[in-house]
Image (cartoon, rainbow, N blue to C red):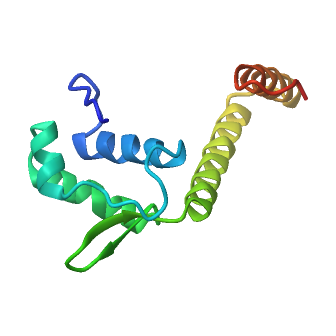
Amino acid sequence: MIILDYKDRRPIYEQVTEKLKELMLLGVLKENEPLPSVRSLAMDLSINPNTIQRAYTELERKGYIYTVKGKGSFVAENGEMKENRRKEVLVQVSEIIDEAIRLGISDREIKNMVEIQYNAAKKDAGGEEA
């Protein structure tokens, strides 16, 4: 389910957080499905339970999961998850455009690259070109 990359510069909890978010957004982990307990996931990944707890806390803070006292953590509704992720991606796109402008990349170059990338990604995803 989750494979950690010890060569990755990101902290382990961030890797766990990202992998769980990906599994939720892809529908592998479904709405209201229980997540593994902190202890069991920590044992499966051979890492400290505090690392898993930190990842779960981060996911809950961002609205990807919710916790029921005495029952564990569960996957939140996908609609809210997807909307949160959509907002995160739009912020990243905005930051990249700001940086491109600061570096002197023209609006024409930015628009061309966005169009090329969008069409390629859409084609890869099995959609039609826009």
Give me the residue at 24% from left, 80% from top: 69
| x and y percentages locating residue 35 in the rendered image | 30, 57
Where residue 95 appears, x then y in whole percent?
Answer: 63, 44
**Residue shown at the point (85%, 29%) measured from the top left:** 111
Which residue sits at x=40%, y=60%? 33
* Residue 24 vs residue 88, the one in the foreground: 24
Classify residue 7 by image quadrant: top left
Q: Along the line of sight, which residue is nearer the eye, 130 or 14?
A: 130
Query: Is residue 120 left or right of 17 when viewed as pictured?
Result: right
> Residue 77 vs residue 102: left or right?
left
Quick one: quadrant of the C terminus?
top right
Q: Quadrant of the N terminus?
A: top left
Would residue 53 appear left or right of 17 to someone viewing this image? left
Where 97 sits versus 17, above or below? above
Q: List the single residue furthest toward the bottom.
A: 69
* Residue at 30% across, 66% down: 73
Q: Where, by quadrant of the figure, is residue 61 drawn?
A: bottom left
Q: Is residue 28 above or below residue 7?
A: below
Image coordinates of residue 51 in percent, x first then y, are 17, 51
